[in-house]
Amino acid sequence: MPSRHFSLLYSGLVGQNILKMTTPNKTPPGADPKQLERTGTVREIGSQAVWSLSSCKPGFGVDQLRDDNLETYWQSDGSQPHLVNIQFRRKTTVKTLCIYADYKSDESYTPSKISVRVGNNFHNLQEIRQLELVEPSGWIHVPLTDNHKKPTRTFMIQIAVLANHQNGRDTHMRQIKIYTPVEESSIGKFPRCTTIDFMMYRSIR
């Protein structure tokens, strides 16, 4: 077994290839979803849905998933899979799902395998995405589009946590956001308002 001094020296001599081999492939964080909203191309529609959970520890439920606070979280309190059910009152176009996970804080409570399903109700859900996460720390962007980049239209989204890191039983999920594309004006296409000042006046209230 080479000494630590020799290992560091050898890595320095060989270059980045050795470092890449010894560094775990962690799930890279995505951009803050608020950046998506600032482009004016999508808007968050989670408030239009009815949310339910397969289980939760008291004080760690839907409110914590939707409070825009990365320090709070949903904690399940039951057997796997752990489910987040998001039901819309009418068929809705959805483009992107954003989930915030933090392995550094949550460790064995952090999801490692997630399934995303859509359908009209609980009885006909179909999986459209399955994610393998490796020590995620930040926003995970999940496209809800088909092979032609066309957004999904659905009454219901279900997020199923199939496994956690270190074979953990219960899970933590800190935030979930759902985005729909903003339709172009029927009158004509205008430059998008991308600054905060302009976005205050982009719609009639």
Image (spheres, helix red, strand yellow):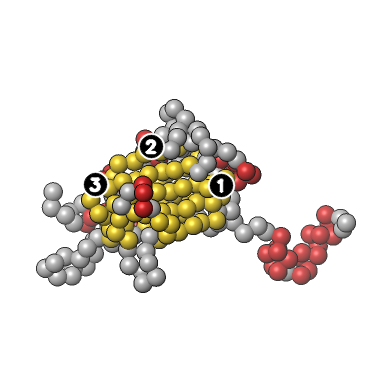
153 relative position to 14: left or right: left
Q: Residue at x 46, y 47 (%)?
A: 160
Q: In terms of secondary structure, where does tag 1 sit?
A: strand
- Please name which of the two marks, 1 or 2, marks the residue nearer to the observer: 1
Q: Is residue 101 above or below residue 13?
A: above
Mark 2: few, some, or many residues within 10 Å (few <14, many ≥20)? some
**N-term-proximal mark, 1 vs 2:** 2
Q: Position of residue 42 (x, y in %)?
A: 29, 58
Q: Residue at x 77, y 64 (%)?
A: 11
Give the label on residue 89, or none.
3
1 relative position to 128: left or right: right
Give the label on residue 62, or none.
2
Q: Is residue 68 visible?
A: no
Residue reaching furthest to the front: 123
Label 3 is placed on what type of residue?
Arg
Label 2 is placed on what type of residue?
Val
Cβ atoms under marks 1 and 2 closer than 8 Å: no
Measured in 3D between alpha carbons, the distance from the residue under mark 1 to the one under mark 3, in whole angstroms, is 30 Å
202 relative position to 195: left or right: left
Q: Residue at x 43, y 28 (%)?
A: 59
Give the label on residue 163, or none.
1
Q: Quadrant of residue 166?
A: top right
